[in-house]
């Protein structure tokens, strides 16, 4: 999952970046509203965490321009503005959720998780479920036939992305795009390596290869 | 409070009445003078005719009755004369038994003399010399009919004047009312302004009202700007404080929880306190307690969005039903109203098992906006309801929250002069009813 964090307080960003990365998200960070406005077009982000009091351009303005320009990625507003009128305005500008500072880090993770699932049409349960598989995002492990299967960070990230996009053809490029932030080295071989490891742990039929097109997560169905 | 129209009408009536009476009095006085002068001329002629009736007889001059005007022979006819030659005197028969004193000087006598009956006599004395004899002729005429005439004229004129004034007063009242119409219009607009149905007064008014209206508009804009400025300043302050608080809290959680649980606990408690104080201060300062056309609450616009916000904020299957989106815009400030509803619903959602209901309506007399929030949660024991409303008080720690929601609601309701009540809900939990009096 590729996230964009737009937050101008360096100290907070310094805390949030490792937190989110530890939980398997690829995160890019921007501190200026004008940069965010442009950057969202360059990469295909799965979710944006947006502060409102931004230098350059106010977060609410950034959000409504994104929506006007046809960008539909989920946006979670993270702000100190805590009045209900501002929440309603945020939602109306096109936000998917609204979290006010100060907040508990776990709360932020839960909201991110919930918004991601909702935007992919999954119900919000304790574990992410898709095609007969379950994923525990807290423990970063998969459940298959009542059995827990431990995953590495990279495997977890990849499986989560597959499970949020079940039965959808995903190109190697798209996987790269969504699993690594803008600063990571991208190597198409790495994707293949992780897919093969997942097949070994979960069964070969879980992820199908479409030659020249990409991969398809079909799970146990 | 006395009306401008009434005061103007009364003063105009009194001043015109006084002026009219004065002018009338002067006119009558002048008429009286003229009349007396005319009478004097007549009396001089009469004296000449009386002289003509003195004819030489055997004993000198004697009065020849037949040559006199018949009026002098009719008793008390109102026309009299007397002729004196030395010690002899002739009186007109019309004098009958009345006396006619001789004036002290020649010409018209200035005083009116009480005559026979109710007559008022004007006397005229003149001297002649005839056949070597000095004659003094006094003629008199009753002036009472003229006086009566003047009196009647005066009464009639006064009556006519009062009638004219009454008509004038009516016309004036009508003119005043018409003239003050712009004032009435401005008053209506100010009421609308206060009720939030108008953003500023129409400046296209009578020239006399222009400065007033412009000034009111300027004040209104100034107030709005001031409010906006202070709200923004507060928002900035809030932002400036909360982000560092978030950083501190996260750092504290991440690094102190294991290493120094006591310190962790202490810091978190202090942070909670700072945060609660900041929130409450901001919440209270944000209350506008009044709305303009631009900032009033429009149920149709915001209610559904608010319900959706709450559904997303509470990560559990909840039915949040909202009634009252059909109400017209209300003269309550939008962010105040959303703060009230948001906090009440937020509380209800925290405790509800599965259902929350908000009903927004007007009280039966239409002078207050009523908000009713129901939930199907555990409710609050009647004996402890008063405590809940107190500052930062939380009865139960099971659900996350800082107990500030209801305190902010209470502050806002107080700023609007409204009332807040907690009762049992038909859904099984708590029912919060608040009513906000509407201006105008």
Image (cartoon, coloured by chain):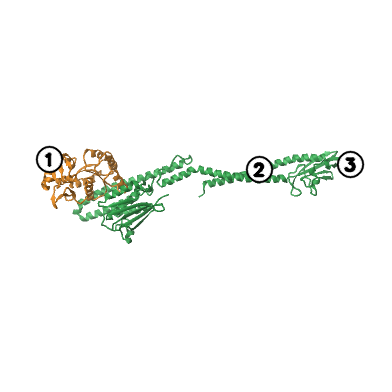
Chain colours: A orange, B green
User: Which residue in the structure is indicated by mark 2?
Assistant: B26
Chain that bears disc 2: B
Percent from the top left, x then y, of residue A112? 22, 47
Closer mark to the observer between disc 1 and disc 3 = 1
Q: Can you see residue A191?
A: no
Distance from the alpha carbon under mark 2 to that under mark 1:
125 Å
- Asked whether, in this view, residue B29 is left or right of residue A76, the answer is right
Coordinates of residue A12 in the picture (x, y in percent): 23, 46
State how many labels appear. Answer: 3
Q: Would you say A191 lies left or right of B8 here?
A: left
Judged by depth in the image, the label closer to the viewer, 2 or 3, is 3
Q: Nearer the viewer, residue A208 or A82?
A: A208
Taking B207 as reference, is B395 above or below it? below
Badges 2 and 1: C-beta atoms under 8 Å apart? Answer: no
Task: Find the residue positioned furthest to the left.
Answer: A200
Q: Is residue B7 visible?
A: yes
Please tell me in which quadrant of the rendered image residue B201 appears.
top left
Secondary structure state at the residue bearing disc 2: helix
Q: Real-space Cα distance between discs 1 and 3?
A: 178 Å
Q: Please, which chain is the residue tagged with disc 3 on?
A: B
The picture places residue B70, in percent across and down from the top left corner, at 80, 43
- Label 3 near label 2: C-beta < 8 Å? no
- Residue mark closest to the camera, 2 vs 1: 1
Both on one chain, marks 2 and 3?
Answer: yes
Identify residue for label 1: A189
Q: Secondary structure at mark 1?
A: helix
Marks 2/3: CA–CA distance: 54 Å
Sequence-first tag of 2 and 3: 2
For mark 3, what is the residue? B58
| In-front residue for pair B202/B228 | B202
Q: Residue furthest front?
A: A221
The chain holding disc 1 is A
């Amino acid at each position: 999952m590729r996230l964009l964090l737009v937050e101008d307080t360096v100290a907070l960003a310094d805390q949030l970046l490792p937190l989110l990365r530890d939980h398997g998200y690829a995160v890019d960070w921007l501190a200026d509203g004008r940069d965010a406005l442009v950057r969202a077009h360059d990469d295909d982000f799965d979710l944006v965490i947006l502060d409102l009091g931004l230098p350059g351009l106010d977060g609410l303005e950034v959000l409504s321009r994104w929506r006007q320009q046809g960008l539909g990625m989920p946006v979670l507003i993270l702000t100190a503005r805590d009045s209900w009128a501002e929440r309603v305005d945020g939602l109306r500008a096109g936000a998917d959720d609204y979290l006010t500072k100060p907040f508990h880090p776990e709360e932020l993770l839960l909201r991110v998780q919930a918004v991601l699932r909702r935007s992919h049409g999954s119900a919000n349960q304790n574990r992410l479920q898709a095609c007969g598989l379950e994923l525990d995002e807290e423990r970063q492990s998969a459940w298959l036939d009542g059995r827990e299967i431990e995953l590495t960070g990279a495997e977890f990230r990849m499986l989560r992305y597959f499970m949020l996009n079940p039965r959808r053809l995903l190109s190697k490029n798209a996987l790269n795009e969504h699993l690594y932030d803008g600063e990571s080295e991208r190597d198409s071989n790495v994707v293949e390596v992780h897919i093969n490891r997942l097949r070994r742990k979960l069964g070969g039929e879980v992820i199908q290869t479409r030659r020249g097109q990409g991969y398809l997560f079909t799970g146990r169905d | 409070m006395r009306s401008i129209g009434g005061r103007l009408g009364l003063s105009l009536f009194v001043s015109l009445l006084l002026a009219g009476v004065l002018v009338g009095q002067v006119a009558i006085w002048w008429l009286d003078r003229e009349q007396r002068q005319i009478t004097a001329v007549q009396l001089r002629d009469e004296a000449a005719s009386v002289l003509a009736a003195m004819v030489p007889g055997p004993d000198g001059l004697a009065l020849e009755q037949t040559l006199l005007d018949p009026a002098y022979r009719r008793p008390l006819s109102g026309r009299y004369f007397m002729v004196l030659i030395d010690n002899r005197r002739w009186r007109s028969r019309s004098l009958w038994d009345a006396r006619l004193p001789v004036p002290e000087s020649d010409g018209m006598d200035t005083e009116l003399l009480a005559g026979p009956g109710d007559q008022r006599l004007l006397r005229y004395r003149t001297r002649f010399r005839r056949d070597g004899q000095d004659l003094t002729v006094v003629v008199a005429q009753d002036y009472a009919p003229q006086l009566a005439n003047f009196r009647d004229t005066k009464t009639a004129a006064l009556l006519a004047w009062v009638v004219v004034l009454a008509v004038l007063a009516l016309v004036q009242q009508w003119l005043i009312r018409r003239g003050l119409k712009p004032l009435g219009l401005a008053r209506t607009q100010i009421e609308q302004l206060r009720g939030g149905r108008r953003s500023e007064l129409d400046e296209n008014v009578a020239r006399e009202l222009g400065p007033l209206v412009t000034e009111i508009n300027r004040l209104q804009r100034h107030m709005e700007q001031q409010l906006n400025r202070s709200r923004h300043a507060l928002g900035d302050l809030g932002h400036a404080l909360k982000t560092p608080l978030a950083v501190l809290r996260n750092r504290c959680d991440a690094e102190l929880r294991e290493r120094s649980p006591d310190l962790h606990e202490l810091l978190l408690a202090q942070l909670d306190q700072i945060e609660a104080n900041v929130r409450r201060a901001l919440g209270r300062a944000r209350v506008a307690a009044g709305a303009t056309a631009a900032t009033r609450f429009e149920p149709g616009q915001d209610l559904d969005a608010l319900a959706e916000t709450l559904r997303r904020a509470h990560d559990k299957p909840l039915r949040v039903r909202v009634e009252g989106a059909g109400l017209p815009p209300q003269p309550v400030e939008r962010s105040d109203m959303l703060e009230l509803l948001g906090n009440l619903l937020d509380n209800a959602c925290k405790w509800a098992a599965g259902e929350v209901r908000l009903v927004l309506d007007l009280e039966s007399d239409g002078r207050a906006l009523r908000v009713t929030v129901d939930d199907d949660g555990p409710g609050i024991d009647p004996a402890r309801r008063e405590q809940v409303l107190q500052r930062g008080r939380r009865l139960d720690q099971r659900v996350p929250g800082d107990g500030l929601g209801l305190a902010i609601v209470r502050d806002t309701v107080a700023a609007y002069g409204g009332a807040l009540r907690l009762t049992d809900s038909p859904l099984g939990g708590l029912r919060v009813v608040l009513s906000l009096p509407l201006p105008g």
